[in-house]
Amino acid sequence: MPLPIPDEQLQRIQPVLNALLADLRQRTQTLTPAIDLALQYHPEAGS
Amino acid sequence: MTIREAAAALRSRQISCLELTNRSLDQIAKLNPRLNAFLTVTGEAARKRAAQLDRDLANGIDHGPLHGIPIAHKDLIWTRGVRTTSGSKLFADYVPASDAPVVEKLDRAGTVLLGKTGLHEIAYGVTSENPHFGVIRNPHDLERSPGGSSGGSGAAVAAGMAFMATGTDTGGSIRIPASFCGVVGLKPTYGAVDRTGIQPLGFSLDHVGPLTRTVGDAGLAFQAMAEPRHIRPAPPNIQNLRIGLPENFYLTSVDPEVKQAVENTARLAEQMGARVSPVRVPDIDALNAAGRVILLAEASALYEPYWNRREDFGADVLALLDQGRLVPATDYVNAQRLRRALLQDFHALFTSIDCLFTPTTPIAAPRIGQKQVELDGQMVDTRLAATRLVRGINVLGFPALSLACGTSTAGLPIGLQMIGRPWEEGLLLSLGEALEPRFPPQPPM
């Protein structure tokens, strides 16, 4: 088992990471929902 | 002296391969104690190799334009029998049993290996302040950063220690040192140069390319390094090449001197016959966000076997590896989906232009240890500022060339980034070579 991330480190890195993930999630809201991907080809679905 | 000039001097017997190598080794002996650009110098092997290449030339065996040219490899590229540390305590004593294919190719092209250049730990950062092997310094100002992660390669080429040095670029690690050190850096198209035998960081973002003093030299090095099957021929000249100058993102939150230098260079290209037009670029902030999440996850996945050796990592690298452990798989997958959608937007942009002009970095070289820089009246993390204009191009996999396009009032180089369509390195090199004579290199130190 890998060593857990120490609490002190978690407190340091989580605000930075959370801000990045929140930014990403806001931007990925524009991605096509599954039902629409099922109905038509979309580039983000890959091939 | 450029590679082309050295090649001509070698063939006219004005200089020998051994003399050329000794000059480089003398420069390393003189400057490396201050710059720390080289981690390992292979002087004896280099002299032996150069003497053999002199004998080859005397016997009519010419290996081509790089015959007898002294070069260096970034110290995460495997070199048989020569320690390859990746700038990491984990691999401090690692000696590969074989050369990376790119090393073999450059060897077959007749180069002389001088040694291995220093880097940011495991290439995961842009300062080259390495906790295990020391700080690398910028030859233009020893108190300033050479950039990273290929900081040793940038410093070595700028200081005249080597004619060419290899670099790797996962989020700007060739182009940032090129910009800060005032040299040429080519990040080729994704996959154009074989990455076998090179320590990976982000396997869907990693690229390999050359750093040189001139664009012509970068072209020679790239020809020797690349897999030729996909590379498109260069245009005959730059007449009517369509250059896009971004109206959004790339020229905002940029030092005014940098902005001015890039705009001046675009005007210069126009005077030389290219067609420059304003363009709106797709969402680069989104591209950068996707790129950061993808790299966090990929790097932590690759370094999973070493998670238990926390004390062997520097604090900044450990913080990034720990962040990557916390990225949910759903975010990684959606970042990849976003990447694919944005790639379509960029291909659409490049139907109306052949090349995009941007600054390489929004600032000239920051001071060593400088945590923040001021841009548009706001304090910004130096690492985010340095990668802001380059990271997205790794996400796309498009080629990009950085060359000096001016000097700041502090006497520091300013870098221009030229971005092209996949496999059109030749176009970027032609354009860069046409512009380069207008920007004579500022000798460092």
Image (cartoon, grey):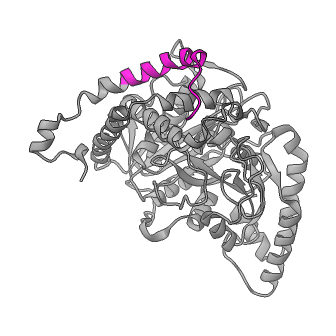
Q: Is residue B41 above or below residue B265?
A: below
> What residue is shown at x 86% (from left), y 38% (from top)?
B34
Location of residue B42 in the rendering, given as x and y in whole percent from the top left corner: 84, 59
> What residue is shown at x 80% (from left), y 52% (from top)?
B161
Is A10 inside the magenta-drawn segment?
Answer: yes
Which sits in the foreground, B278 or B175?
A: B175
Location of residue B151 in the rendering, given as x and y in whole percent from the top left corner: 69, 41
- In the image, is B108 to the left or to the right of B245? right
- Residue located farthest toward the front when viewing the structure as drawn: A1
Q: Quadrant of residue B345?
A: top left
Location of residue B183 in the rendering, given as x and y in whole percent from the top left corner: 66, 46
Is A43 inside the magenta-drawn segment?
Answer: no
Q: Which residues are magenta?
A: A1-23
Which sits in the foreground, B241 or B67?
A: B67
> What residue is shown at x 85% (from left), y 44% (from top)?
B32
Location of residue B400 in the rendering, given as x and y in whole percent from the top left corner: 49, 48
Q: Quadrant of residue A21?
A: top left
> What residue is shown at x 43% (from left), y 19% (from top)?
A18
- Residue located farthest toward the left when viewing the structure as drawn: A39
- In the image, is B18 to the left or to the right of B207? right
Which sits in the foreground, B411 or B394?
A: B394
Q: Is residue B233 visible?
A: yes
Q: Quadrant of the C terminus of chain B?
A: top right
Q: Is residue B280 above or below residue B118?
A: above
